[in-house]
Amino acid sequence: MKRVFLTIALIIGALCVKADEGMWLPYNLSNQSLYEMQQLGCQLTAEQIFNLNQPSVKDAIVQFGGGCTGELISPEGLLLTNHHCGLSYVQKHATVEHDYLTDGFWAKSKEEELPNAGLTVSFLAFVEDVTTAALEGVTDEATRRDVIDKNIEKICKERKGDRDVEVEVVAFYSGNQYIMFEYNVYRDVRLVCCPPWGIGKYGADTDNWTWPRHKGDFNIFRVYTDKDGKPAKYSPDNIPMKSKWFLPINIKGVKQGDYAMIMGYPGSTDRYSTSYTVKNIIESEGPATIDCRTTKLNEYRKHMDTDQEVFIKYASKQASVSNYWKYYIGQVKQLKRNHVYERRLAQEKAFNEWVAADAARQAEYGGMWDGIQRKWEIMDDIEKAFTYLYEAGWNGGEAVAFSRRFMKINKLINEKGSKEEIANMAEGLKDRAEAFFKDYDMPLDRDVTAALLNLYYKDITKYVPDMMEKLGAKNGGDFTAWVEAAFEKSVFTDKDRLEKWLAKPKKLDKDPIYMLAMGFVSEYNDVVVPLYMEAALAGNAGERQYMKGLMEMQPERNFYPNANFTMRLTYGTVEPYKGADAVNYDYYTTMDGVMAKYIPGNWEFDIPQDVRDLYAARDYGRYADENGDLVVNFITTNDITGGNSGSPVINGKGELIGLAFDGNWEAMSGDIMFEQKVQRTICMDARYLLWCLEKVGKVQNIIDELVIVE
């Protein structure tokens, strides 16, 4: 196996690319991409950006917490990411007496920094193309997945050895290519700074996925190591990381046309999918997700708006649910508005004409669509129920979801395992139970569960668990009374009852919440998943062929791989855009816009008094622009998606100018098709970050630690 040698990318590497579209593999930048970057203002070499043998920008970029990106901004391991990425960890430290969510948290010394159980950050250490090894022994579609899985397991085991690293092999180009990634994982990551709610969450659901924005979407953590600089679990003896590379912060400000580069870990895109995928999102997946999450969010707000303790417990949960609730609303709308389905059909028509023009192509691709069509016949039948089973079923109510963690111990009890085995397993569940009830509100969960069951029974007529069907027929589709009784009885809705059960475990088969959860599990695993696997077996080969054929048909097109939470680089410029007829958006916002949205006492648009006082005094210090304004957010043409949250926005010299945190409403279809004219990345300006640290948080200790370019 050779180190990073990507055949597909090399075939297309010297061809023309668009400056904005593309989530590029930073370890394999083509000459054309580098030329484009340099023309836009990049002064860094490829080796300065990514180097496996010497420190480079990539050593400042991390996977944060399993779903976001972060970057080092100081020699001592200070780590910057988004407020919404770190929110759940801040929430775990918050209480009514010390409400770090509302008031913020500012560590004035390293001794005040707070550890976070379970939080990890991962640094990319090695990359290698392993396509040949991954596909070794693949002979047919029926056994393909199993063979590849075994090959990948072997590859990872051999690479990892007895070292404390994480190794994964990831599919690219619909399974036409496989690449191995090795990461160093750090497990002592401490909270340093979190702005108050009126900065970090400003605009909340109303402003989410829209421009203009006025949000200070940041949190700061610090990575710690053992005394030898190696990854280690939390210990008071650990020391701040000695950063291999960190990003200086430039406060000269951004102007239209300025170069902007983003490196991070975009989660998922589907830019090369067929029209069937687009239709399914518009008609089934999107509406089903929206309906389930709307129901859940309505119940959340009823309880969160009337009880501050509940608000603290559910702030992160509500944000998580609402983020992709609004995402799907926007995606469905913009897929229609931007005619993505019709554009996919046109692409498929051109592909079919290309195939028909050559006998060899007919032989290779002629029967491709049969399997794809069969796949989507099955998916169209199960998609809505599949979504409801997850969103409103086994992951709907919290107690229902939590009870699934007890499947193993219940099986052991039913199989008459030894008392010692059962006791040991119960002991292992005590910490999970403690963590669950710390942030649990039974009345809220009761109302959420009842509302979701009512919705499920009303909307889904096929693939409904037997228990739900019987209860629904008996109660006329209103599960409210049953849920109330179940919550009064179940061990999973009351901490004392569960602690007593853990002290003396017995069968859970008659616990109503556990029974409900097992009904969802059975319907999901025994009925829907087999159909899903049948669909995959029918269509995946054809979709893989389609990807290969598109690349063959369009040799002039640079086919960057879909996002899959591996490190990517995107480059573009700071630019305004036209959102609609007579709607023209500037490329930046200021504190004037923050104050224009201010609504006293409103959970989305309230502003702390000290921030209002600073605004009234125009006390912006060295962070004001040439007009005396404080720039809050700006937009660029960079191509990002979920997972890029917290990614650094870097200028041509490799300096931090902003922090990526969102996309814009007009391009919500962008995960399926990049919208060249309107797609924008929304970024927090570095000057606003430092103003918050210096003027609001008064953490001069942090300011002094940074390298600031004026």
Image (cartoon, rainbow, N blue to C red):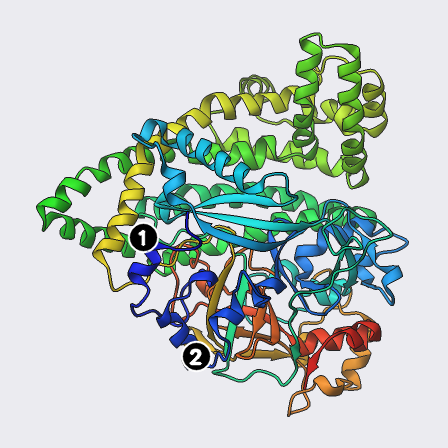
* Residue 446 on image: x %, y %: 71, 33
Quadrant of the image for the C terminus? bottom right
Q: Residue at x 64, y 92 (%)?
A: 626
Label 2, secondary structure: give it: helix
Label for residue 38?
A: 2
Residue located farthest toward the top when viewing the structure as drawn: 416
Q: Mark 1 Cα within 10 Å, few/some/many (few <14, many 20+)?
A: many
Q: Is residue 83 left or right of residue 50?
A: right
5 or 38: nearer the viewer: 5
Q: Is residue 592 above or below residue 580?
A: below
Name the quadrant containing residue 405.
top right
Q: Is residue 443 left or right of residue 352?
A: right
Q: Disc 1 designates what residue?
A: 341
Residue located farthest toward the right when viewing the structure as drawn: 97
Name the quadrant containing residue 436.
top right
* Residue 320 on image: x %, y %: 63, 49
Image mark count: 2
Q: Residue at x 67, y 49 (%)?
A: 318
Q: Residue at x 76, y 27 (%)?
A: 429
Q: CA distance from mark 1 to mark 2?
A: 35 Å
133 or 636: nearer the viewer: 133
Q: Is residue 447 above or below residue 422?
A: below
Label 1, secondary structure: give it: helix
Name the residue type under label 2.
Answer: Gln
